[in-house]
Structure formats: structure tokens, C-alpha cells
Image (spheres, coloured by chain):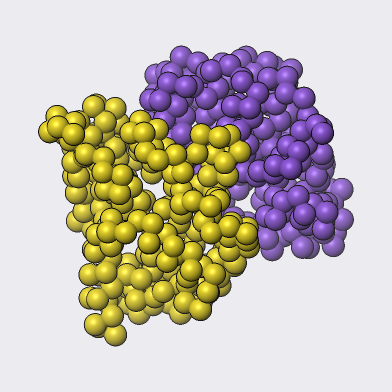
Chain colours: A yellow, B purple
Amino acid sequence: MNMAAKKALEVYLDMLSQPCRAVHIFLNHNKIPHTVKTVALRKGENRTAEFTKLNPMQKVPVMVDNGFVLTESDAILKYLATNYHVPEHWYPRQSERRAKVDEYTAWHHNYIRPHAAKVFIMEVLVPRMTRQPVEQPKLQRALEQLGDTLDKLEGMFLKRQPFLCGDDISLADLLAVCEIMQPLGGGRDILKGRRKLESWRSRVISALQGSFEEGHQILYQLRDKTTSKL
Amino acid sequence: MPLEIYLDLVSEPCRSVYIFAKKNNIPFEFKKILLFKGEQYREEFGKVNYFKKVPVIKDGDFTVSESIAILIYLAEKYGTPDHWYPADLQTRARVDEYLSWQHSGMRKHAAKILWLKAFGIDVPKEKMDSAMEDLEETLTAFEEKFLQDKPFIAGQKISLADLVAIVEIMQPLGAGVNVFEVRPKLRAWKDRVRAEIGPVLFDEAHQMIFNVEEVAKTIDPSAKEIFKPKIIKLFL
């Protein structure tokens, strides 16, 4: 595609943010030309007057496609999948298969996203900000809650199929894997010992190849930094 | 086999599905699940929906939960008027944007207050004040980011976004919290949405929340003891 097309689609991302990684990996994997504008949350770049004008919620990711501004990673991914004619398995057109992806992306908001993020926040972000040690009892409760959620993920979405919504990778798997990777920033693999989920993750990484690894570089760097201190 | 929809109208996502199906004359069998009686924990229901939650639909062999997924599925399958879930990609994206945000934005805060009141849970004042503050912030964000100066969230016409929003925003009214009192813009939007849906259907669907305290009185005390910790865990 030409340079004009590349400039026309912009995404505002922080690669330490799980939904940002999902958008970034999706764009790269599907070779959709775009420009990345970095917004470093830890530096407060989401609170500048300029960014606030773009997104009053002060959150990432944000997509601007030829002037059309869109927030919320679910909406962005569904829009990109449709507008850029990616392979259908990402967001199937057939209503029952699509409903399964919509079902997962809805459920994700109340389970995988908050519960995995909480562990990362408690183990990495809060100690960094407060310079206090991790609050163990709180962390234990968060880990238990995450454990229940991972049980549900496995029991409901991976019972008789290789990917969360069927035989092929979809937006669901992409969103889920980025959340599941997050606690790795603190050196914690939340899937350790969960064979079925580990196999699922390998399949997802395999399907995404280079774009997964590239998308997670910053998280790996954080992991290396954190674990070298332990 | 007819479409089965498992519902309890005291639940906001159930109301959005109910209103949508009725408004669009979608034939279905109303399978009542009484949440306050713990009917969602029954074994037969667990077979329909692993998550033991409502709403859930069963269309022949096909089952799907999560009101957002259900609404989109029904809109497509029954060919409802375009404005509900527009074919135009950018307008549709606006609807998707709201449907995504509302999970952690609207839903969490609007629901809290009613459930706490219904179960007569003694909430420490700071927590109640904090819950009210969160609700106020959410409503302001809704007005400023999603509604702005448009008649409806996606623009000129009502969509799934307004339907999903209205059922949540109505919820605190059941706890005696009139969110529309000092928000004329919000009230005007609510009146438009109610008019589009049809006042009879709208009021009928919302009747339950006004009777929440009465319904709560009918709960078995032992069931109440099971519920209270779950609600406390969820909302406090």
C-alpha cells in the first residue's frame, strides 16, 4: 500500500497496555499499513492537553482512520477486521460464529481483563509507585480470583475446541492472550501448570508468529528488569 | 423449536434483551429465572448456561449468553431495522464503542446501589458516598463523551447502545436515587428513548425495579444469607 494509506491510519498506543498490544499485533499480523504514535502512560502522556482533546477519557488505544476517531479495543478490532478485509476467522460473518466472539469479548471485560490486570498492578505497578512491598494477603485473594476465572476460561471456552471461539484463532484469542501475558512483566506466568491453557497459548503464539514476539518486547524487557531485582 | 430466552427483569441486561425482542416482535418463549430465589444455581439451568447467569438464549441447539452478543445476534438473525445495529461501518463502530465501554463504565456503578439497598446491606457511609460519586462521574462521562449534543448515542437514531445504556441508568431509580433530577440533558435523552421504545413496553419492563424492596422481602432468609456475601464481594 502507498504512503498516503499508511499516514491515513494512526493508532495511539502504549505497548505496556494489554489492549494496545492486541491492536498492534493485529495490524502487523494482517499487514495493515499504519502509523504508531506512542503514548507513555507512566510519563502521563495520556493527560496532555493534546491527547485529552483526542480522547477525553485519557485512555489508550485510540485509532484515527482518515479522521475517524475510535476508542475501545473491542470496537477498534472489529472495525479494522471489517474495514481492512482480513481473513474471516478473526471476526466471522456467520451469525452464530460471530455471536461466540461477541460473547467472549463481552465476558472478557468482567473476568480476564480485570483479574489478570489486578495481579500485575499489585505485583509491579503499586510497589513501584508506593515503594512499599507487595501486600501479600491482597495478592493471594487476587490470585485466587484469577484462578477461578482461568478455570472458567478453560471450562467454557476450550472444552472441545482448539481456540476460544472455534477451530480457528479469532479476536477473542488475541485479546485474551495479551491479558494473560501481562503478569509476566512481574515474572509471573499465570498459566504455569495449566496444561490445557498452556497448549492454547502455544497455538495462539504459533498462529501469530513474529508479530506476537515483536509486540511483547517491551513486556519482556520489564520482566527482565523486574526479575533481575528479585 | 421456538427461541427460548431466560430472563429475570430485575436484571438490567435481561431488560435490554426483553425490550429488544418485544419491540421487534421477535417470537420467543419467556423462561423466567428468579435470581432472588437462586434459580440460576439450579442444575437444569447450569446445563443451559455454564456461567449460571442471565440473560441467555437457546435457539435450537445454539446457546449464547452475554446481552451484547444476544442483542447483536437477534438484530442480524431477525433483520431488525438498520438503526439498531447499523450496517454503516463507522456508525456501527460508535455503537460497538459504547457497548464495550459500558462494561466497566456504566454497568458497574449503576447496578451497585440498587443491589445494596435491596438486600438491606448496611453499607458504611464512605462506601455509599464513594459509590454515589462513581455513579455521578460515570453519568457525566456518558453525557459528555457518548451523548454530547446528539439525540442518541450513535447520532440521529436510537440503537442498541441507547437500549443497553437506558436499562443501566434506570437501575438506581429502584433504590430511590433519581439520577435525572439534576441532569436535564440525560432526562431529555431518557424521554426520547422511552418514546422510541414505546412507553407501555418501557414501563412494563421496568416495573420490577420499583418493587425491589417488596421482592426482597419474599426472599427466603437462608437464600438471603447466601446472597449477601456474594453481593458484598461484588460491590464493596
Residue name at image x 14 percent, y 32 percent: A2
Q: x and y percent of residue B206 in the render?
A: 72, 30
Q: x and y percent of residue B175 in the render?
A: 67, 40
Q: Farthest residue to the bottom: give it.
A: A230
Give the left or right position of residue B57, taking residue A25 as reference. Answer: right
The part of the image, by quadrant, that contains residue B197 is top right
Determine if residue A111 is in view. no
Give the left or right position of residue A111, taking residue B200 as reference. Answer: left
Of the 4 image quadrants, the one containing the N terminus of chain B is top right
Residue name at image x 62 percent, y 43 percent: B66
| Count of numbered marks | 0
Of the 4 image quadrants, the one containing the C terminus of chain B is bottom right
The part of the image, by quadrant, that contains residue B64 is top right
Residue name at image x 35 percent, y 30 percent: A83
Q: x and y percent of residue A120 in the render?
A: 39, 67
The part of the image, by quadrant, that contains residue A127 is bottom left
Residue name at image x 26 percent, y 48 percent: A28
Q: x and y percent of residue B100 in the render?
A: 47, 40
Q: Farthest residue to the left: give it.
A: A3
Seen from the viewer's position, the closer of residues B217 and A120 is A120
Seen from the viewer's position, the closer of residues A4 and B37 is A4
Task: Give above or below for B79 relative to B57.
Answer: above
Task: Give above or below for B44 relative to A152.
Answer: above
Seen from the viewer's position, the closer of residues A29 and B43 is A29
Give the left or right position of residue B195, taking residue A186 as reference. Answer: right
Seen from the viewer's position, the closer of residues A168 and A109 is A168
Give the left or right position of residue B176, taking residue A32 as reference. Answer: right
Task: Give above or below for B17 relative to A140.
Answer: above
Determine if residue B51 is in view. yes
